[in-house]
Amino acid sequence: MAMSTASSRKIVVLSGGTAANSLVDVFNGLIEKNNCSLGYIIPISDNGGSSSELIRVFGGPGIGDIRSRFSTFDLFPNSVSSRLVRLIPPSNAGILHLFNHRLPSSPQAASADFLTLLDLTSPLYLPIPRPQALLIRSILSHLHLEILKRTRSPSSTFNFQSASIGNLFLTGARLFSGSFESAIYLFAIIGGVDESRNAVLPAIVSNFTHHISAGLEDGTVITGQNAISHPSAPTALPESPTTVVPSSTADEPQAPSYPPDVSSHQSIEDATLPGSLPTLRPSFLTVSKSHEPPLPSPIHRIWYINPYGQEMQPSPNPNAVSAIRASDAVIYSIGSLYTSLAPILILNGVGEAVERGPRFKVLILNGSLDRETGGYGAVEFVKAVVGCMEESSSRLRSNRSGPSSDDVRALLWERAATDVAAVVRKYVTHLIHIDHPTAPAVGREVLASWGVECVRCYGRKGEDGKMR
């Protein structure tokens, strides 16, 4: 049976994080080859990197994954990133560079760099048409005003350290319009993104922050996406206010510094509600994505929490659910299984939309394992995806958040083989895996018994000759 007519073919890609960006050129190739549209559904639970400082001061969703999907491109033409293609077209390369630019790692130098964006002296504006440059400057100026309104020197100040201009623009646009969706729309319009072919949809539409927790099999609970995937020390509060100020104040006495721990953030008045979990308050501007210590036990389950640590079930973006239902194929992309993919899958209604909508449900297996999936094979990846989907669907069927989440997962794999296969096929029909020594074991026989078709492919060769 062929897919829908060319004019109505639709593919939806699920996953956030930087790993999925490495396949943007592949996905764009699908658009060209099949004359179809493609939608990216991105989680908003990231609380690390420069997004964490924006969340600390302004609240709101984690926007880093949204921005990175819009502005994936080749900064270094001789590196692996040269293979990436843009959602922002090459004709808007100046805007592409501006939105991907990061301010210096020194808070004071970063403030000075940001000032050049406000007075239009930044060389980043040179290749950008003046109407767009002035509009971008207006949004950044509005953000600066909001920063100044929230400044309570010497402690409550905004740290521009390593901030992404794209993240700053999205936040300024959200604060100006009062709408996360409007901010994304403005970002796409200025960047010249053809949203009829490439749409970026947040998994949740909200002006509030949404955090996740992970329950491990040994009973341990880890709070916050950053702590789950890339644990790092909180960033110390800036030694002096890092809002943009006239240079004449440079010789004034410096504000006291604070130790880089959670307790130093407890007395700060910011966007975090009083009584919130202490681990959700600080910024985590320096995030290491290598040499992470292994988890003490495998992850059993992911769930959303409110600022006080209580489990909650936020409503999914209805446009995202509709996009899944209307699609011909849904792709579970590479990335962190439990922090980039699961936050989408566990949302109420997503499981049912995948079950009843697309004919093809393709899981792209990661090329290597990370902190979240140590010891996993393809079978465990499929089990995790199906477990999230069944949890989502069961809540919708029973119209309750109940204590059945653990029961759903436990009972699923105790069913008869034919019943298990029927459940798996509702959510996963194909698995694409890389032929590489670092790749997880596939377990073809088990997957075949579930009716999952496995497709082997070969990775890309990096500059060092190794397959990626």
Image (cartoon, helix red, strand yellow):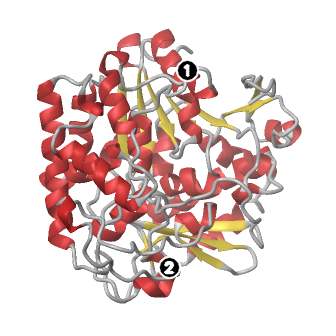
Q: Is residue 330 visible?
A: yes
Which quarter shows the C terminus? top right
- Dividing the picture into quadrants, the one containing residue 10 is top left
Q: Nearer the viewer, residue 460 or 132?
A: 132
In the image, is residue 66 above or below residue 93? below
Q: Which residue matches tag 1?
A: 77
Residue that numbered label 2 is attached to: 279
Q: Position of residue 463 (x, y in %)?
A: 73, 24
The front one of 463 and 432 is 463
Q: In the rendered view, does 153 fall on the left or right side of 420?
A: left
Residue extending farthest front: 251
As helix, strand or loop, the secondary structure at mark 1 comes to loop
- Horizontal side of 379 relative to 322 (left or right) equals right
Q: Characterize the local packing of mark 2: few (<14), some (14-19) or many (20 or more) Cα atoms within 10 angstroms.
A: some
In this picture, residue 328 sits left or right of residue 414: left
> Quarter-wise, where is residue 331 in the image?
top right
Mark 2: amino acid: Thr
Q: Dot 1: within a 10 Å radius of its alpha carbon, few (fewer than 14), some, or many (20 or more) residues?
A: few
